[in-house]
Amino acid sequence: MTGLAVENLSYAYGPRKVLKNISFTVEQGAFCALLGPNGAGKSTLYALLTRLFTAPKGRIELAGMDLRQSPLAALAQIGVVFQQPTLDMDLTVEQNLHYFASLQGLVGNSSRNAITGALDVMSIADRRRTRVRDLNGGHRRRTEIARALLHRPQLLLLDEPTVGLDAAARDSLTAHIHGLCHSQNLTVLWATHLVDEVRPEDRLLILHQGKLLRDGIAGDIGGADLAANFLDLTAAPA
Amino acid sequence: MKNEGLPPHIAPISYLVALWAILWREALRFTHQRGRFFAALVRPLIWLLVFAAGFRAALGLSISPPYETYITYETYIVPGLCGMILLFNGMQSSLSLVYDREMGSMRLLLTCPLPRWWLLSCKLLASTVISILQVYVFLACAAIAGVHPPWPGYVMILPALILSGLMLGALGLALSSFIKQLENFAGVMNFVVFPMFFLSSALYPLWKMAESSRLLHHICAANPFTHGVELIRFAFYQQWNPMAFLVTLGFAVLFMALAVWGYDPSQAMIRRKK
């Protein structure tokens, strides 16, 4: 099954085109990095994938569900971590997760079990009753990801999830999500502008000025030096 | 309503679960923002205990429905101040929605597998419940200060508070969908909240306004906030004001429709043109 399919997707803010006829597919259970400099159109693509906006042109399929035809069924397949923090700082980790579980239709035991499972998966079970304000940046991000995993989505969409984290926390989070991808057959779309978060075996999409410049395996695209190749590719106008 | 392909695990009970969750979160946020609660309480109390005391001598109020006898100015403005709490709270919720949108939690809510109109309705209901709680705390303070309408009125106003609260909350919701940044909110205060409040029957009866300007009287009579306040005023005296009810209901539906339209994903394109 296809984890994510995007076909001929375009989007413009008035006269300014930010996505230009993008097409790609990601297999179920694959880790796909979406690499692009600031302003490449990554956040707009995420807004379209999560139906915050709808595009007049193009087609999106999330875990086999057409987003235009069955928007709610498609949204039920995804877990999202936005670039901006979305946790309520004055609530505990558990209260934040409980709120989101309810919005996903989980109640009673199923909600409690889902929260326990997601906290275990993200290795933050001991922070369950800690107020989010008292967590460090890395744990807040882990909480956001735990929240996104509560309803056992097929597809995890992460928009620059490592923003604001130190190098150790970034490494740890990237490794953790790679592990999840393999252990739970979860499809992951991981947007970033940091080359060192991409592994040679990852699927890689390079987005620049709204155009998809490369689509393939990171090791093949980057060769010996992905960072240098990425800089070369994005230095010139798309 | 378009069939949006409800996923199998989203049973009809999920609608109520989501409503409860949003109510619970708003209540928790409210308890964490005590400053907001006191600000919302102090504002109408200052009007009641300071402003009204000064105006009492200057304003002569003749007998007009629903009043059957002469009343003090303090008694007159109590329904208007209830409306003031609903109005300011509706705008406060709108402000927090714009903040939520910038911060991301509104995005998160809108990506849930429930229809957007329902999620917005839950937000609206939650903010209305919080507003009504504040109104009753204000009324208790006013009663302690010796200003109280007839006691049965405290129960009778509840439906009127709900409808007026929904109308003003829906207005806030609609405005929040069209405001791009928090900075634009000062404009809302100047061009929506203050004109709505002062060009209404909250502080002075419409016939009094007509004595000074026919034009202002017409504007006040057309103001939906006037009708929300009159609905509350009549309910206090266990009277039914059909015109106020219909206008308040009509505007509540209109504002909610505008909010749903403003938050429609295909409209986002129009809103975010740069």
Image (cartoon, grey):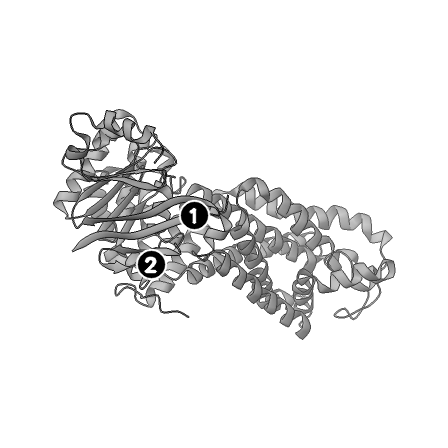
Q: Quadrant of residue B3?
A: bottom left
Given the image, what chain letter belongs to the residue carrying mark 1? A
Residue highlighted by disc 2: B113
Disc 1 from disc 2: Cα separation? 26 Å
Chain at tag 2 = B
Looking at the rendered structure, the secondary structure element under dot 1 is strand
Quarter of the picture containing the C terminus of chain A is: top left
Residue type at numbered disc 1: Ala
Q: Nearer the viewer, residue B179 or B8?
A: B179
Count of numbered circles on the image: 2
Picture quadrant of residue B207: bottom right
Disc 2 marks which amino acid?
Pro
* Residues indicated by labels 1 and 2 sit on the same polypeptide chain: no
**As displayed, is residue A220 above or below residue B48?**
above
The reply to whether dot 1 and dot 2 touch (C-beta < 8 Å) is no
- Find residue B145 and report its horizontal and vertical position in percent: 69, 51
Which residue carries the number 1 mark? A12
**Label 2: element kind:** loop
